[in-house]
Image: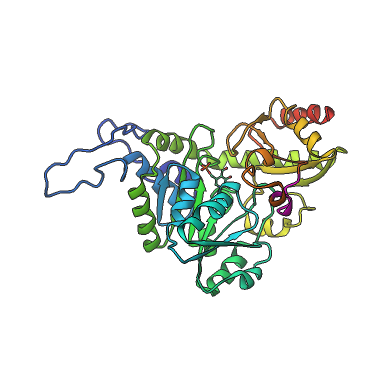
């Protein structure tokens, strides 16, 4: 089966009792045992649930992975992957990373005796200098949040593997529709399924996908033990959402490209960060690595912080809100939203100035989106 078909059919047989085409919602905390000699496959929803199991099978198939573990959020999935670390280990984290991941590295892991330092994923050789004798795991993402830089996944994996590291990759921004990092040698792919996989801004969820049975068992056991699991209804909604991932993503990419081109020509816009633009510093690697350039873009406006804030508050079709990957377009201001956890100094060092805005381009009529940005830009 190919990608779009897998999203609709993997694990989704007709319901055995009524031949329902859509899997029923198993909103049950517990499942009956026939007798004490036979432990049921699914007996308690913290450990597993039919809706979750089906979604796990679909997400694993879409990432070309053997196993998926689902979580209550993307952050829980990332921390689930970090559960492979123990006291005394060292973690290498890419400099350009989602603010929530940065927060875990800066504030939580050191409390558990796990040290963290950064490396530059755009310069994979930097791993050679950053690695320490106790480095066990490396995490990175591309395209990055919020600057949409694209690093070469295979090149990072090659150097990380030469040091025996477990490689974790956050594929939230691209989604499995645009790239499959396990095929490029990554050990564990994590997702905020809140975003493109669910696609409708009505669920918080996460996933970790791997081909490695040892990592799978350890992450599953951690999830079961702490109970960071999604509800059956959230899985049911995500399963409905993921069925249209291929068509949604095609439209996200098309709309984002048109908006990036429009913004590039606008006199009040000083910089557009979109890997689909030939002028983007990582256009060539994005072209090689991705099936499309994605629905996320960022841009900087003339007039600094004040102008950016005014623009964010002036759009009407683009909603001013956190998050991304839903069918509706959102505009975000990273210093107060996705990267609010960082100090201004940290943000500036990571190339996140006050003049930067991030948009998640939805699937509306693109002309309405361009008209909206046009009227908002006229106000700054
Ligand atoms: C790239 C990336 N990874 C992980 C997360 C965390 O996901 P969640 O909010 O589902 O915990 C986010 C959230 O914005 C994100 O953008």
Question: Where, quadrant-wise, is the C terminus in this rendering?
Answer: top right
Asked if residue 352 lies in the magenta stretch, the reply is: yes
Tell me what residue is drawn at x 76 percent, y 57 percent: 281
Q: In x, y percent, where is residue 82?
A: 46, 57
| Nearest the eye: 304 or 23 | 304
State ligand 1's quadrant: top right
| Nearest the eye: 257 or 100 | 100
Q: Is residue 337 above or below residue 167?
A: above
Q: Which residues are magenta?
A: 347-353
Q: Is residue 1 visible?
A: no
Residue 123 falls left or right of residue 200: right
Tell me what residue is drawn at x 68 percent, y 62 percent: 122
The quarter of the displayed image where residue 320 is located: top right
Q: In x, y percent, where is residue 44?
A: 26, 41
Asked if residue 261 lies in the magenta stretch, the reply is: no
The quarter of the displayed image where residue 314 is located: top right
């Amino acid at each position: 089966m190919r990608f779009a078909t897998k999203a609709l059919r993997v694990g989704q047989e007709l319901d055995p009792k009524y031949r329902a085409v859509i899997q029923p919602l198993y909103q049950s905390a517990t499942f009956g045992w026939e007798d004490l000699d036979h432990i049921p496959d699914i007996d308690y929803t913290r450990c597993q649930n039919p809706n979750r199991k089906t979604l796990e099978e679909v997400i694993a198939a879409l990432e070309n992975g053997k196993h998926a573990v689902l979580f209550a959020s993307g952050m829980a999935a990332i921390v689930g992957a970090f559960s492979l670390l123990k006291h005394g280990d060292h973690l290498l984290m890419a400099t350009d990373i989602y603010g929530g991941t940065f927060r875990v590295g800066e504030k939580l892991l050191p409390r558990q005796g796990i040290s963290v330092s950064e490396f530059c994923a755009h310069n994979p050789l930097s791993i050679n200098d950053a690695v320490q004798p106790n480095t066990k795991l490396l995490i990175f993402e591309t395209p990055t949040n919020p600057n949409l830089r694209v690093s070469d996944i295979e090149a990072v994996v090659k150097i990380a593997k030469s040091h025996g590291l477990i490689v974790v990759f956050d594929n939230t921004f691209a989604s499995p529709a645009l790239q499959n990092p396990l095929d490029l040698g990554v050990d564990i792919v994590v997702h905020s399924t809140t975003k493109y996989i669910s696609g409708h801004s009505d669920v918080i969820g996460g996933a970790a996908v791997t081909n490695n049975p040892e990592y799978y068992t350890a992450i599953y056991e951690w999830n079961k033990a702490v109970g960071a699991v999604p509800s059956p209804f959230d899985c049911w909604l995500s399963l409905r959402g993921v069925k249209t991932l291929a068509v949604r993503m095609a439209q996200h990419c098309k709309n984002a490209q048109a908006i990036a081109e429009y913004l590039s020509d606008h006199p009040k816009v000083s910089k557009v960060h979109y890997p689909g633009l030939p002028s983007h510093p990582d256009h060539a690697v994005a072209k090689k690595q991705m099936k499309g350039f994605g629905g996320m873009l960022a841009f900087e406006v003339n007039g600094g912080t004040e102008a950016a804030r005014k623009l964010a508050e002036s759009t009407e079709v683009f909603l001013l809100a956190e998050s991304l990957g839903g069918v509706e377009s959102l505009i975000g201001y990273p210093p107060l939203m996705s990267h609010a956890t960082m100090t201004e100094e940290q943000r500036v060092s990571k190339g996140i100035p006050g003049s930067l805005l991030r948009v998640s381009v939805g699937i509306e009529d693109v002309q309405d989106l361009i008209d909206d940005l046009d009227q908002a830009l006229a106000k700054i």
